[in-house]
């Protein structure tokens, strides 16, 4: 039994529910300048609500098996309240955990979120920026949580780690870093800017303030000075993204008008003024940290790297270039070398790389304990794939013109897909989890394929999965998820037969390498319903309940977040949708 309600995919991107907890913790990293005092150490904080089994799972995810007990702390609400003074107590749920490790000079601050499916709000770029504000230098931060959390408290345990190491924390810098997370979220909510672009604005504002203080000796910046600096930095930063910015802060990026409201500018100026009072604002080395962080692609997310890509590389040049060797099984998972071998054989034959591109995301999800070195290797290969695929830019543009539609560049299309996945994880983490489970089984990553025309009949949720071409979308799979037992079936496109799928995609069939499924699943309530679904009454016929509300894509565009960045216990945020009058309730999340 299936297909009793078909709902538009765009609705999913329009649901802006942010999960709440009891209570939520607004915390981030504070490594401070004295991190050098513990540079030879690896430090680990574990959420105090984790069971013994979850602790071991988290340690494995973070690659922290070698951390000594003396360098490990358990963080509960009372510990967090001691640093943040936010009212947290012994009843506060704390799941998220952090691992920090110092790095060589010039590394900057890099953040790896090991379980992105469980961090629903705060992004690696935002953690990165706030960590530098708090004083971090040349450090790798890894974050993991076995249960869904919004993410504001993912690094709160670092305060306790540094205190245990004898480091005197700077409370002022901590509070400014906390405010920075909120302001960056507000910039995104107030505009069409991506996460990376909003974080870039914050980074540039900090650099300009430090330059004014350290180089121009402007130690008494007025409110007007800072507001003018913020406004000009917004214009300059967006001009570096797209050369079409108007003086009134109405900006066009990729043919989309971006407006940064006076209220948001005022919030940015207030935060910037607070930053100007910190010790970091008087330290010229912080500028170097910000620049090193931006320049060093090691540890950066794929979306950050993709945003910086320009042009293309011919097949001949790709084949002729020196190739890296990833065959050392003590350093790299064997599938990484197999991916590279498949890539070169594919482009030599003039084939398409979207399947391989999708499989890199499935691999990353199934093996969350990948090291930063392995992740960098994956991103290097994705870069090669982009450079290869970008050779079709002129043909894609001609195809768009032939059917009279506005052309979207390949880079923008790939970025939009990545941003939409992140947005869905924030808006509806349960739905995002269902899609990820299907992707893990089919190899059809939502970062590449569109999950469209979602339907529900009782415990069955069905998706059409498509690959978007320039002028049309090609149906790839018809898949159904069973809420009662978490099983997945795929319907044969010819016979309609339901074929049961294993939870792990069979990489060995294509690449000759088996992959063990270490994916950290989030809970899917058996009574979950897709937005707008109401179980039909007994007297209503199936035909009457099969109304098509919309046939647009599930993951089509990024959502406008409407949840406040300071979440409070038991609060729920409201969202709007062109097709729904009421949004589904969000799942509770701890920290």
Image: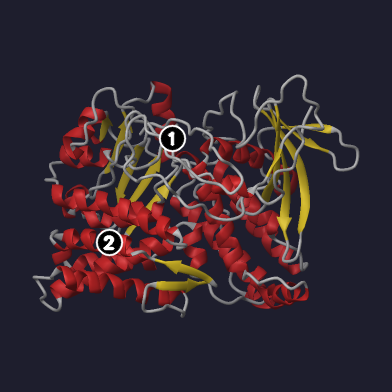
Q: Secondary structure at mark 1?
A: helix
Q: Secondary structure at mark 2?
A: helix
Where residue 203 appears, as percent x and y from the top left, is 31, 65
Where residue 22 appears, as percent x and y from the top left, is 34, 28
Q: CA distance from mark 2 to mark 1?
A: 39 Å
Residue beneath disc 1: 60
Where residue 348 appears, as percent x and y from the top left, is 74, 68
Mark 2 Cα within 10 Å, few/some/many (few <14, many 20+)? many
Relative vertical location of residue 559 with respect to residue 245 in this rendering, above or below: above
> Going 47% across and 31% down the picture, which residue do you hit?
587
In the rendered structure, find residue 270 and report the number of the disc placed on it. none
Q: Is residue 216 visible?
A: yes
> Going 50% across and 32% down the picture, which residue do you hit?
585
Relative vertical location of residue 207 with respect to residue 419 in this rendering, above or below: below
Residue beneath disc 2: 268
Mark 1 Cα within 10 Å, few/some/many (few <14, many 20+)? some
> Going 66% across and 68% down the picture, which residue do you hit?
389
Q: Is residue 166 left or right of residue 335?
A: left
Lower sequence index among marks 2 and 1: 1
State the image quarter where residue 200 is shown: bottom left
Q: Residue furthest right?
A: 495
């Amino acid at each position: 039994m299936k297909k009793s309600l078909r709902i538009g995919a765009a609705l999913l991107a329009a649901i802006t529910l942010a999960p709440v907890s009891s209570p939520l913790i607004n915390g981030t990293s504070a490594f401070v300048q004295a991190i050098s005092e513990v540079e030879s150490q690896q430090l680990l904080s574990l959420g105090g609500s984790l069971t013994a089994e979850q602790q071991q799972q988290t340690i494995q995810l973070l690659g922290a098996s070698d951390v000594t007990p003396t360098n490990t702390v358990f963080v509960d609400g009372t510990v967090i309240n001691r640093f943040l003074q936010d009212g947290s107590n012994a009843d506060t749920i704390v799941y998220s955990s952090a691992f920090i490790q110092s790095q060589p000079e010039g590394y900057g601050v890099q953040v790896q979120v090991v379980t992105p499916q469980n961090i629903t709000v705060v992004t690696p770029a935002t953690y990165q920026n706030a960590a530098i504000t708090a004083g971090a230098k040349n450090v790798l931060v890894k974050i993991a949580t076995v249960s869904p959390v919004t993410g504001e408290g993912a690094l709160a345990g670092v305060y306790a780690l540094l205190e245990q190491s004898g480091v005197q924390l700077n409370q002022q810098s901590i509070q400014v870093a906390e405010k920075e997370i909120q302001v960056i979220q507000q910039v995104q909510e107030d505009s069409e800017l991506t996460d990376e672009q909003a974080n870039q604005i914050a980074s540039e504002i900090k650099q300009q303030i430090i330059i004014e203080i350290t180089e121009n000796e402007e130690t008494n910046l007025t409110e007007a000075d800072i507001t003018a600096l913020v406004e000009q930095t917004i214009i300059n930063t967006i001009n570096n993204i797209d050369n079409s910015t108007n003086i009134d802060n109405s900006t066009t990026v990729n043919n989309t008008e971006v407006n940064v409201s006076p209220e948001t500018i005022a919030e940015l100026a207030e935060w910037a003024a607070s930053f100007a009072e910190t010790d970091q604002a008087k330290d010229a080395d912080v500028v170097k940290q910000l620049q090193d962080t931006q320049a060093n692609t090691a540890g950066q997310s794929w979306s950050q790297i993709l945003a910086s890509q320009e042009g293309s590389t011919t097949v001949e040049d790709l084949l002729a270039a020196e190739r890296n060797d990833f065959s050392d099984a003590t350093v790299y998972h064997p599938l990484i070398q197999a991916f590279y071998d498949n890539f070169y054989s594919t482009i030599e034959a003039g084939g398409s790389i979207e399947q391989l591109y999708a499989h890199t995301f499935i691999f990353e999800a199934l093996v969350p304990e990948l090291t930063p070195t392995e992740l960098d290797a994956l991103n290097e290969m994705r870069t090669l794939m982009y450079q290869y695929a970008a050779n079709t830019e002129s043909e894609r543009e001609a195809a768009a013109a032939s059917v009279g539609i506005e052309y979207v560049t390949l880079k923008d299309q790939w970025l939009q897909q990545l941003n939409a996945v992140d947005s869905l994880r924030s808006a509806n983490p349960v739905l995002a989890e269902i899609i990820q489970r299907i992707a893990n089984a089919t190899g059809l990553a939502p970062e590449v394929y569109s999950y469209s025309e979602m339907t529900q009949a009782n415990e069955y949720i069905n998706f059409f999965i498509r690959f978007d071409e320039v002028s049309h979308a090609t149906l790839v799979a018809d898949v159904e998820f069973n809420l009662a037992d978490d099983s997945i079936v795929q319907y044969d496109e010819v016979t309609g037969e339901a074929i049961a799928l294993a939870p792990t995609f069979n990489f060995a069939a294509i690449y000759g390498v088996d992959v063990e499924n270490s994916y950290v699943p989030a809970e899917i309530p058996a009574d979950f319903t897709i937005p707008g679904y109401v179980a039909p009454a007994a007297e209503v016929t199936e035909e009457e309940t099969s109304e098509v509300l919309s046939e647009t894509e599930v993951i089509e565009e990024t959502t406008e977040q409407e949840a406040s960045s300071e979440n409070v216990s038991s609060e729920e945020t409201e969202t709007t949708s062109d097709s729904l009058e009421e949004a589904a309730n969000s799942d509770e999340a701890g920290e």
